[in-house]
Image (cartoon, rainbow, N blue to C red):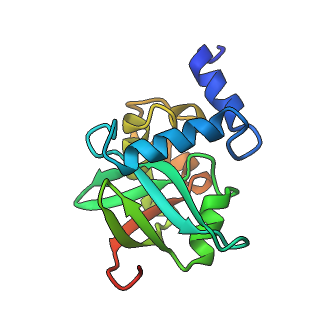
Amino acid sequence: MRAALPQRAARWMYRSGGPNWMARPMNAVAAWQFRRGILSFGGRGVTLDVRGRVSGRTVSLPLVLVRLGGERYLVSMLGEDVQWLRNVRAADGRAILHAPRAEPVRLVDVAVADRAPVLRRYVELAPGGRPHIPVPVGAPVEEFARVAARFPVLRVESAPDVA
């Protein structure tokens, strides 16, 4: 069965593993909005600032914040091979999360065995992420466990010393 047009468009905008010419300006607008608390969808939309590992400049991108079991998480909907994740890891997890206030954080990789419940919640919360994670909304957590190794999940920890 073919995916719906919005899902095909979302996959097309990220088919190279990163945003294409159309997705880049859309992401910039979303990051600007989320940073200011505009259209942040009840606090789910956040902006992450991380230092570029090559340029040294701050890179800002919009993400969906997952709250589950008293913890906060970020998900890489495109998998391991994305620039922002490489930047976070090169910075030893140090970043600034705007939700909308700026909060210095440390992002910690979640073990593959613990990712499935977070991925399940992410698919419920992030319409833009759904086309990239091949498990439908409402599927049992076991189905998410089967794809968990492909989608990094990072736990957000407050880190006042990071700034």
Rendering coords of residue 129 (x, y %) = 52, 38
Looking at the image, is 53 positioned above or below residue 68? below
Looking at the image, is 55 positioned above or below residue 151? below
Q: Residue furthest left?
A: 70
Residue name at image x 32 percent, y 54 percent: 99
Rendering coords of residue 100 (x, y %) = 31, 54
Q: Nearer the viewer, residue 111 or 43?
A: 43
Quadrant of the image occupied by residue 156: bottom left
Is 85 on the left or on the right of 163, as rendered?
right
Instruction: Give the tally of numbered discs.
Output: 0
Q: Nearer the viewer, residue 5 or 160?
A: 160
Q: Residue furthest bottom?
A: 161
Position of the C terminus by quadrant: bottom left
Looking at the image, is 94 positioned above or below residue 21? below
Q: Nearer the viewer, residue 41 or 56?
A: 56
Rendering coords of residue 149 (x, y %) = 59, 56
Position of the N terminus by quadrant: top right
Quadrant of the image occupied by residue 80: bottom right
